[in-house]
């Protein structure tokens, strides 16, 4: 669409207009973990109502960046397992609730697509909860159900290590995809109305989850493996399945995930071993850029289609960010770059938020139409009735 006629005169003006028209919904921000590690979860110790230059995220920059909705990552380290992981995840949800309470003029908890849109209409940033890592449910579908009641609207099936029922892309495969219980987790998430997040999982799990899910899936913070070969990214054969599933891939800004050169640097750095300090002096870190991120959006549009692209920055979850996307104030710059590349306004609106809102509605509709009762399946090896033929689905 041209910049003439009724349209604003500059790309940045058009970008800001689009952010006022539809909510930019980012799929992944790790600010709650920053509160845990920096302040023992005490919001009184870090006032994001004012500038916090040690973070990527604060209220002034969220407003400057035109953020309309944010999935706050409820992340728990994979070093924490079992009941302790369940408790830690609950504590992280408490951080999100406390953020909403502390800044009511900025944030509003949202549990549905309609609530996201209402918050945006009222000038609030819709605050959504994403549970990062299936280890956080401690192998219990009852815990999964309670996390949904507490507001979790997606769960990433793994983090950097396997769960007993699903393989991570950064661990050695054990289940070779989803176990029988893992498939039951997906079905129970469909019944509840919780989005299945496939960032962090192995390619085999991606395929199994797409086969098992009756609802659209998401990748909350992943990019295209064809452009950067990191295993955290999505292969083209999986991207090609997005139209059939209806899901969305939310492009992340992590430098090693968007720049092959940065990824190659990270691999060489890991191989340096004991000589790391000397190696780093001789090998300055290359930069990823906003343009690299836009390249991934181009690729997703080409392979999966414009209806299956979103944004999941991973701010405050990484040590390095791309040039031009240094913090949450910079989203307009990415929007302007897409406009510069010839994206139509309606296409950009889909990427900003309309696609993920559509996925949320579809997931909600699958849950509303489900006639199943709560699954009584138990994880393999958890005692009681064994899974497999003895799985009970009421």
Image (cartoon, rainbow, N blue to C red):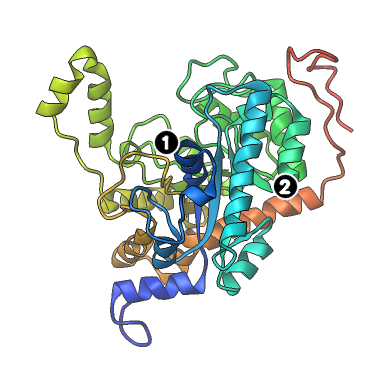
> In this figure, which residue is indicated by the disc labeled 1?
233
Residue 252, by quadrant, is top left
Against 24, residue 167 (above or below) is above
Camera-near label (2 vs 1) is 2
Q: Residue at x 27, y 55 (%)?
A: 324
Residue furthest to the front in view is 44
Would residue 309 appear left or right of 166 to someone viewing this image? left
The crowd level at tag 1 (other Cα within 10 Å; few <14, some 14-19, many 20+) is many
Q: Residue at x 38, y 48 (%)?
A: 55
Would residue 81 appear left or right of 308 to someone viewing this image? right
Residue furthest to the left in view is 282
* Tag 2 secondary structure: loop
- Examine the rendering and report whether any part of residue 243 can be seen: yes
Foreground pick, 234 / 19: 19
**Percent from the top left, x then y, of residue 127?**
58, 56
* Tag 1 secondary structure: loop
**Percent from the top left, x then y, of residue 232?**
43, 33
Residue furthest to the bottom in view is 5
Q: Residue at x 59, y 40 (%)?
A: 92
Against 149, residue 112 (above or below) is below
Quadrant where the image shows the N terminus: bottom left
> In this figure, which residue is indicated by the disc labeled 2?
193
Quadrant where the image shows the C terminus: top right
**Could you tell me how many numbered marks the image carries?**
2
Q: Residue at x 40, y 51 (%)?
A: 302
Foreground pick, 328 / 163: 328
Foreground pick, 169 / 69: 69
Residue 228, by quadrant, is top left
Against 202, residue 234 (above or below) is below
Against 302, residue 190 (above or below) is above
CB within 8 Å, label 2 to label 1: no
């Amino acid at each position: 669409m041209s910049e003439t006629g009724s349209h604003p005169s500059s790309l940045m003006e058009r970008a800001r207009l689009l952010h006022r028209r539809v909510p930019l919904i980012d799929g992944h921000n790790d600010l709650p973990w920053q509160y845990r590690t920096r302040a023992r979860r005490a919001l009184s110790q870090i006032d994001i109502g004012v500038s916090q230059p040690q973070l990527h995220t604060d209220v002034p920059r969220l407003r400057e960046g035109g953020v309309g909705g944010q999935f706050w990552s409820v992340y728990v380290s994979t070093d924490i397992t079992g009941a302790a992981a369940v408790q830690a995840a609950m504590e992280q949800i408490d951080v999100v609730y406390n953020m909403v309470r502390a800044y009511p003029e900025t944030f509003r908890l949202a549990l549905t697509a309609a609530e996201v849109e209402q918050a945006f209409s009222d000038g609030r940033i819709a605050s959504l909860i994403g549970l990062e890592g299936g280890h956080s449910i401690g192998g219990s579908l009852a815990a999964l159900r309670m996390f949904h009641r507490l507001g979790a609207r997606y769960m990433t099936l793994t983090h950097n290590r396997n769960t007993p029922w699903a393989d991570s892309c950064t661990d050695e495969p054990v289940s070779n995809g989803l176990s029988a219980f893992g498939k039951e987790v997906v079905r129970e998430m469909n019944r509840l109305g919780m989005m299945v997040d496939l960032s962090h999982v192995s390619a085999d799990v991606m395929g199994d989850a797409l086969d098992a899910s009756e609802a659209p899936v998401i990748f909350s913070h992943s990019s295209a493996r064809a452009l950067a070969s990191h295993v955290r990214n999505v292969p083209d054969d999986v991207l090609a399945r997005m139209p059939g599933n209806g899901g969305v891939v939310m492009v992340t800004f992590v430098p090693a995930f968007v720049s092959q050169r940065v990824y190659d640097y990270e691999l060489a750095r890991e191989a340096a071993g004991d000589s790391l300090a000397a190696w780093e002096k001789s090998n300055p870190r290359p930069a990823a850029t906003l343009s690299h991120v836009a390249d991934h959006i181009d690729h997703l549009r080409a392979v999966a289609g414009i209806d299956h692209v979103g944004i999941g920055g991973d701010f405050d979850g990484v040590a390095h960010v791309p040039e031009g996307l240094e913090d949450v104030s910079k989203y307009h710059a990415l929007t302007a770059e897409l406009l510069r590349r010839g994206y139509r306004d309606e296409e950009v609106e889909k990427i900003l938020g309309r696609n993920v809102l559509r996925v949320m509605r579809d997931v909600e509709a699958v849950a509303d139409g489900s006639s199943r009762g709560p699954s009584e399946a138990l994880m393999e090896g958890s005692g009681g009735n064994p899974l497999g033929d003895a799985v009970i689905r009421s």
